[in-house]
Image (cartoon, rainbow, N blue to C red):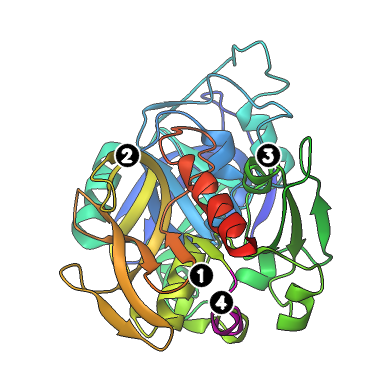
Amino acid sequence: MTTSTRGSTRPTAPDAVLVLEDGRTFRGRAYGAVGETFGEAVFSTGMTGYQETLTDPSYHRQVVVMTAPHVGNTGVNDEDPESKRIWVSGYVVRDPARTPSNWRSRRSLDDELAAQGVVGISGVDTRALTRHLRERGAMRVGIFSGEAVADDATLLDRVRRAPEMTGADLSAEVATEEAYVVPAVGTKRLTVAALDLGIKGMTPRRMAERGIEVHVLPATATLDEVYACGPDGVFLSNGPGDPATADLTVVKGVLERGTPLFGICFGNQLLGRALGFGTYKLKYGHRGINQPVQDRTTGKVEVTAHNHGFAVDAPLDRVSDTPYGRAEVSHVCLNDDVVEGLRLLDRPVFSVQYHPEAAAGPHDAAYLFDRFAELMEAQRA
């Protein structure tokens, strides 16, 4: 939970302190709102796209450290948000821009963070902080500024009492409460039921561009509600939290019916668990827009956008037997061999661990939406 008042990027901004659960602290100045906040400390390696990062529901209950040293230079606009609000619990930057400069900018990043009550800290050695998280792993953190700053021992105790990400069931907290429809652009070709586990706004738009009418449903939707719209395919979105907490009833129901299924990020993890694979927490995760992934079906290497702290534990060297037919790992991260995609060989089902909608960039993986449309059209035929 965050308590806040408005902050400033000026040198006169109140003092702030960042406290990690292992006791290491970083001092700086308040950025955005002034107050206190708690979450899981993670880092993002993207050099651009901070507005999309902030508004990605997958970052719910996370404090994001930006590895790029200069943040906020393009300000904030009204076109790029991926949802209706900022979802990060806190924000950490080294050198915030004093004056934004972009033809689409409507306000500064500092003002937007303050207006939405997001507590941040600037003037931090983010390189040292990132190296610490790489060595020790993602962990709980608190940011305190203004009157919230107290002695380090007291703050550390409060950080250690904050909830952990392992075991957190968060999808329903960020998903839509009411179903809505994103109409197809041009001639309607297909209908998709998209389960909102923390969906980004660009995702249904990418499908709509391909003539797909997308029915976005709450995370709590039943199997009957999924099929009520007469879908040609089902989509499992990205989202926050531990996949081990998720109810797999709908996913298994779709698999049993043999309906074309496409999952991304959290959806990839749910598919993996439904197939019988385990999931585990990565040491520090993949977050950014520059992660190299190989599509093992084509051999091509893609630069992809990631935001995940959990991964599927599936064998890379063999085809696995599952309750729904044979499955194999279709994509793999070239940095660390983490599973980045799954596909069934006997049913029209596949998933990836990253963001093919790529807001903001790159667009190497956009073909996956075409692959999904081809599977649906083949199934209909």
Q: Which mark is residue 302?
A: 2
Reading the chain from its start, which is encountered first: label 4 or label 1?
1
Q: Which residues are magenta?
A: 252-259
Quadrant (top left, top right, bottom left, bottom right) of the N terminus:
bottom right
Choose mark 3 or mark 4, whichever is in front.
4
**Would residue 250 be seen by someone viewing this image from the given angle?**
yes
Membership of 67 in magenta stretch: no
> Is 88 placed left or right of 288 in the picture?
right
Q: CA distance from mark 4 to mark 1?
A: 27 Å
Name the residue tied to disc 4: 258
Query: What kind of element bears circle 3?
Result: helix
Q: Are marks 3 and 1 in contact (CB under 8 Å)?
A: no
Please name the amino acid that badge 2 sits on. Answer: Glu
Image coords of residue 271 (percent x, y): 46, 74
Give whichever of 174, 149 is nearer the camera. Answer: 174
> Is 254 placed left or right of 5 in the picture?
left
Q: CA distance from mark 1 to mark 2?
A: 26 Å
Image coords of residue 72 (percent x, y): 53, 25
Q: Residue at x 54, y 59 (%)?
A: 238
Q: Are marks 4 and 1 in contact (CB under 8 Å)?
A: no
Choose mark 3 or mark 1, whichever is in front.
1
Reading the chain from its start, which is encountered first: label 3 or label 4?
3
Q: CA distance from mark 3 to mark 4?
A: 48 Å
Q: Are marks 2 and 4 in contact (CB under 8 Å)?
A: no
Name the residue tied to disc 3: 114
